[in-house]
Image (cartoon, rainbow, N blue to C red):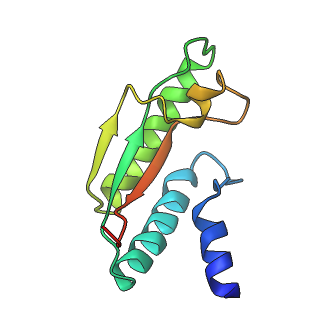
Amino acid sequence: MGFFENAYFFCSTQRIFFCTATQVIDEVISCLQLIDKTARILGLKYNYVLSTSKPKNSNTVESWDKSSDWLEKALIAADIQFLIDKESVNNYATQHNGLNGCGPSIEMQITDATW
């Protein structure tokens, strides 16, 4: 039971990276590869969505665009197929008016195995 609790906790939280700008893409690639490999081993049906929608009152357009670019490059380099959602309100920062530390995100949408 402890494993499933940890797995649920892992899947439901955000990952925050502390690294230099030159390390971002490689770190994201490593995480994506680990998550993708685990999902395939578990036989999950899933897809990835890159959410790039900006908050309405964003004064950090340059850093937002740079972050979106890094995430897209990481997904491509990791050879992961994904959709780009430029208008989603599912993005955490969009819902919270651009809270400090929020930005574009990669969402892994897993199909419910019971359906």
Residue at the (26%, 56%) spot, across then down: 81
Q: Is residue 10 above or below residue 48?
A: below
Residue at the (46%, 48%) spot, across then down: 106
Q: Is residue 32 left or right of residue 99?
A: left
User: Based on the displayed image, in which of its 4 quarters is residue 93 positioned?
Assistant: top right
Q: Is residue 88 above or below residue 74?
A: above
Q: Is residue 44 above or below residue 1?
A: above
Residue at the (39%, 71%) spot, across then down: 36
> Residue 112: x percent and y percent?
37, 65
> Residue 40: x percent and y percent?
34, 79
Quadrant where the C terminus is found in the figure: bottom left
Residue at the (55%, 13%) spot, across then down: 56
Q: Is residue 114 left or right of residue 81?
A: right
Residue lying at the far front of the rendered structure = 115
32 or 63: nearer the eye?
Answer: 32
12 or 105: nearer the eye?
Answer: 12
Q: Is residue 103 left or right of residue 81?
A: right
User: Based on the displayed image, in which of its 4 quarters is residue 1 positioned?
Assistant: bottom right
> Residue 42: x percent and y percent?
39, 83
Q: Is residue 103 left or right of residue 6?
A: left
> Residue 90: x percent and y percent?
49, 35
| Number of marks drawn | 0
